[in-house]
Amino acid sequence: MQEQAISEIQAAETLEALQLVKTRYVGKSGLVTKELGTLGKLPPEERKARGAEINVVRAAIQAALDEKEAALKRAALDARLQSEAVDVTLPGLPLPAGGLHPISRVYDDLIGIFTRMGYEVAEGPEVEEEHYNFEALNIPWYHPARELQDTFWLEDGRLLRTHTSNMQIRYMLEHEPPLKMVSRGKVYRFEATDATHEAMFHQLEGLVVGEGISMADLKGTIAEMARGLYGASAKVRFQPSYYPFVEPGADFAVYWDNPRGESKWLELGGCGMVHPNVFKAVDDLREAAGKERVYEGKTGFAFGLGPERIAMLKYGIPDIRYFYANDPRVIGQFRGEL
Ligand code: PHE
């Protein structure tokens, strides 16, 4: 019986098959167990010797079972490790690549140019108080300039900022001159949309304040920005214009040698020397907040421009609304571009 049992144990190829063999021999009603049950019928003098014999057989079978079970478990583990192994030499799965939005790319270019010139970067709210968007910028309620910038009003009396010039006020409130600041962000105008107008668009605001800052500094700065954007041959042009918060004020354009061949003057934004009323309004706010009046008597310049216009020309995008429609045919073209 021992030999038969051991050869069956060795032949078992799975743990389930081994379990069957185990039951057949050493289970509750297994052959060995039954054999032990017959001991009671033997005459006492034979019982001891026969009992010892059967126990030797049972121990041998149990040892063979244990050994085989361990071997089968090891084999199963090996097989699992094998099947779950990761082949690090296989090529990876392609990940769908994202990309930076064209407006973000233009902003990154601009911010890079200005931070290299030593400007701080500031950020501020899109939901704004009337005072920061208008009054402090020398635009009282009766001023016709308010109609130039149709405003989204909120029910609580606040508004969606119509320009990033609110950041001139907010920055001067927190910082003392001399200072150089640029601020990027969304602005909102209550306007009908068309190929060149959106109700939401972006601006980059710049502000420099110090002793003896002049129009020449402003022109040099805009020219430096143009060269940063379009290379050493870029030209800039200034035309007198009116913004209540600057005096004198100007619009500026950049002459761009477009690789697609349509070189032209690109109207980029507005600029000018900070109006003394703006410095006074800031000092009033500072005083009300328990801070020192430090702006009256200083000079400075400010500018504001729209990255959409730069991006439209740079990437040949014919309609401003394409930027925000999230049409994959448009934004998909910027995939992988960082
Ligand atoms: N805030 C003006 C606009 O939105 C642009 C501007 C900024 C003009 C700073 C002069 C100085 O049109």
Image (cartoon, rainbow, N blue to C red):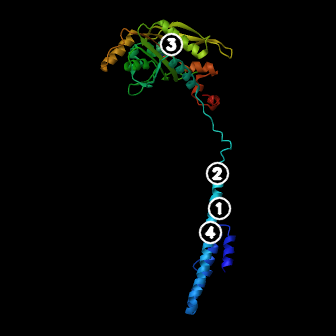
Q: Quadrant of the N terminus?
A: bottom right
Does the rendering let one see residue 256?
yes
At numbered mark 1, what does the secondary structure look like: helix, strand or loop? helix
The quarter holding residue 273 reads top left
The answer to the question of whether label 4 and label 1 lie on touching residues, with beta carbons closer than 8 A, is no
Q: Is residue 104 left or right of residue 257?
A: left
Callout 3, which amino acid? Gly
In space, the residues marked 4 and 1 are separated at their CA atoms by 12 Å
Mark 1 or mark 2, earlier in chain: 1
In space, the residues marked 2 and 3 are separated at their CA atoms by 63 Å
**Where does residue 173 sit, x and y in percent of width and height?**
37, 19
The answer to the question of whether label 4 and label 3 lie on touching residues, with beta carbons closer than 8 A, is no
Give the residue pinned by disc 2: 85
Mark 4 or mark 2, earlier in chain: 4
The 10 Å Cα crowd at callout 4, few under 14, some 14 to 19, many 20 or more, is few
Ligand 1 lies under 8 Å from the Cβ of mark 2? no
Tag shown at residue 270: 3
Callout 2, which amino acid? Ala
At numbered mark 3, what does the secondary structure look like: helix, strand or loop? strand
Mark 4 or mark 1, earlier in chain: 4
In space, the residues marked 4 and 2 are separated at their CA atoms by 27 Å
The answer to the question of whether label 4 and label 2 lie on touching residues, with beta carbons closer than 8 A, is no
Give the residue pinned by disc 4: 67
The quarter holding residue 131 reads top left
Q: Quadrant of the C terminus?
A: top right
Mark 4 or mark 3, earlier in chain: 4
Mark 1 or mark 3, earlier in chain: 1
The 10 Å Cα crowd at callout 1, few under 14, some 14 to 19, many 20 or more, is few
Tag shown at residue 75: 1
Question: Residue, x 57% and y 79% (percent of image)?
Answer: 28
